[in-house]
Image (spheres, grey):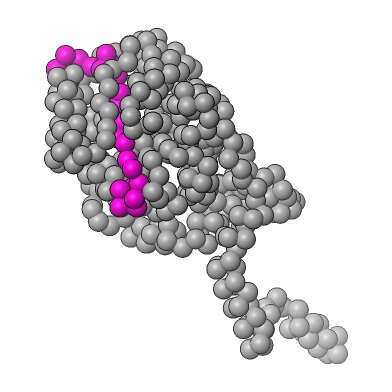
Amino acid sequence: MGQEHATGSAQSVFSSNAVRLSVGQWIFVGVFALAMVLFAPSAWKKAEPFQMEPDYRMPYDLSNDYWLYDRFARLAASHCDTLLIGDSVIWGEYVKRQETLAHYLNDLAGRQRFANLGLEGGDPAALAGLVEHYTGGVERKNVLLLCNPLWMSSPKHDLQETEDVRFNHPELLPQFIPRIPGYKEETSKRIGRVIDRNVPFTAWTEHLQQAYFDRLSIPQWTLEHPLDNPLKPLKHGLPPSDDLLRHQPIPWTKHGIKPQDFPWVDLEQSLQWHSFQRALDILQRRGNRVFVLVGPFNEHLLTVGSRQRYGQMKHAIGAWLEERHVAHAVPRALPSKEYGDASHPLKDGYRRLARQLFADRFFK
């Protein structure tokens, strides 16, 4: 009986790992958690070195690290007088960072005046969210804003399809208003995304996951690396500016791309066009001097009918910008051999485009 009683007592003592905190200890935990939420993101900026490199562009693997993008945008605004904002056409899909539009503009300027704030996969709906929530430090600057007509080339690209489709940067899309037909995320996920882009602490923790923990939450990472020190990845620092080629820099004709009969959507009904207008309005309300670059789209790739419809859209875009006194350029198509696909120039195309733009008085 005595042995059984002793065994039973041992089981009752060691049967739980629960820790009971006193009132004072709970207050300490609450104060510590609040301090982390309020001060950890800003303290991390001091602990994590991030300097403005010549021709820097966001690493492709960190395209969804919006906390880092916001930090880069603020750093670029403090070092450069003109910021280039747009999708992968600005980022440089077929070129290295020393072959982008921003690089060739800097080359013509003779100094680092232009910063590449391109976002891989950033359609106008995503860019509007990016501009609203992650470019708050871009005020009273010169901004070149890209209008890429590719995103209005079909109902699918324009986000009008009602079927559930894969979206670029769903975190940046409008979560409730306006409604995007094919965006069918659960309400709880939408609410979480609204919180993420309005609470710096959650954006910062997402940055840690993106930059250091293989895009996994820290609990997930520790499960996959049970013997590794979870602090070790933080010692590696940020990855350097992206200098890799995403695709081989060869003309579109050698990719086997055939002429395309894009239908093009009605501009007045276009979700992407209205998103572009919203991004432009936000930038202007912050006191920025905005220059809009329309295209240049690879018109050589289009069928005759599609090219005519595109010409009408291009004219309508230019007329809208002219009516609102927005400085802009609607350049002619580059030579066919200087495109990698429907909208991305190769390095010679960027060099040619930079010369055309730099001659504009906007950049003087």
Q: Outermost residue toward the right?
A: 2
Residue occupying image coordinates x 43% and y 15%: 348
State the residue in front, 292 or 117.
292
Taking 251 as reference, is 242 above or below it?
below
Quarter occupied by residue 308: top left
- Percent coordinates x, y for residue 318 in the rendering: 19, 31
Taking 11 as reference, is 310 above or below it?
above
135 left or right of 229 in image: left
Residue occupying image coordinates x 57% and y 60%: 41
Residue occupying image coordinates x 24% and y 44%: 277
- Percent coordinates x, y for residue 303 in the rendering: 20, 15
Quarter the N terminus occupies: bottom right
State the residue in front, 333 or 144.
144
- Percent coordinates x, y for residue 252 in the rendering: 37, 14
Residue 286 is inside the magenta segment: yes
Quarter occupied by residue 40: bottom right
Taking 36 as reference, is 181 above or below it?
above
Q: Is residue 177 visible?
A: yes
